[in-house]
Image (tube, helix red, strand yellow):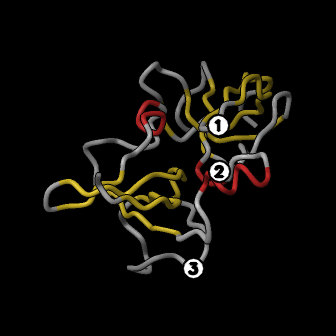
């Protein structure tokens, strides 16, 4: 049996101006998730959830800084006590209106905007640099889909 630790992991873009861990949540925050640290031969491994790769938050060919946040108790006991998972809830709701700027284009050609905590909003039909008003039409734990209701704001 391999030893493992449960914790919350923050992955940020590599170039941080302060050269160390940020004291507040950085604008470069790409994703936030909980994962195990497991021993494999002569190293320890953090498994990045598939959804972070599939949504474009993390590129497997890039280097990232990883911050580990110790919890007072593990996720299972926190979920059992409160009835809700300890992972943060999406910062948007279905039907919500948001003003966003498209920062990137996803693999399917859709516009990508990031809001609080690096949460991704996929905007079909948008291009990099577009500033659009969207209505959130679908919300998942790691991304949302927003339909353009007004362009060039």
Q: Residues within 10 Å of mark 3 (few under 14, many from 20)?
A: few
Residue 100 placement (x, y as % from top left): 69, 41
Which residue is rendered at x = 67% and y = 53% of the image? 86
In the depicted structure, whether residue 99 falls above or below residue 7: above
In the depicted structure, whether residue 82 falls above or below residue 136: below
| In this view, the mark in front (3 or 2) | 2
Which residue is rendered at x = 69% and y = 56% of the image? 78
Image quarter of the C terminus = top right
Which residue is labeled 2 in the image?
87
Q: Are marks 1 and 2 in contact (CB under 8 Å)?
A: yes
Which residue is rendered at x = 14% and y = 62% of the image? 42
Residue 107 placement (x, y as % from top left): 41, 24
**Which numbered disc, 1 or 3, marks the residue that appears first in the sequence?**
3
Which residue is labeled 3 in the image?
23
Residue 129 placement (x, y as % from top left): 56, 38
Which residue is rendered at x = 76% and y = 22% of the image? 137
**Element type at marker 3?**
loop
**Element type at marker 1?**
loop
| In this view, the mark in front (1 or 2) | 2
Q: CA distance from mark 1 to mark 3?
A: 25 Å
Q: CA distance from mark 1 to mark 2?
A: 9 Å
In the depicted structure, whether residue 26 falls above or below residue 124: below
């Amino acid at each position: 049996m391999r030893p493992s630790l449960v914790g919350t992991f923050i992955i940020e873009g590599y170039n941080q101006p302060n050269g160390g861990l940020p004291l507040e949540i950085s604008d470069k925050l790409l994703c936030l998730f909980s994962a195990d640290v497991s021993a494999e031969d002569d190293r320890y491994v953090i498994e990045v959830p598939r959804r972070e790769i599939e949504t474009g938050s993390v590129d497997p060919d890039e280097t990232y800084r990883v911050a580990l946040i110790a919890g007072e108790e593990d996720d299972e006991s926190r979920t059992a006590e409160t009835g809700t998972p300890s992972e943060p809830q999406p910062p948007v709701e279905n039907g919500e209106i948001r003003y966003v700027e498209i920062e990137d284009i996803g693999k399917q050609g859709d516009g990508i905007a990031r809001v609080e905590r690096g949460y991704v909003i996929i905007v079909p039909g948008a291009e990099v640099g577009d500033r659009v008003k969207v209505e959130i039409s679908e919300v998942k734990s790691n991304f949302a889909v927003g339909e353009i209701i007004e362009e060039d704001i």
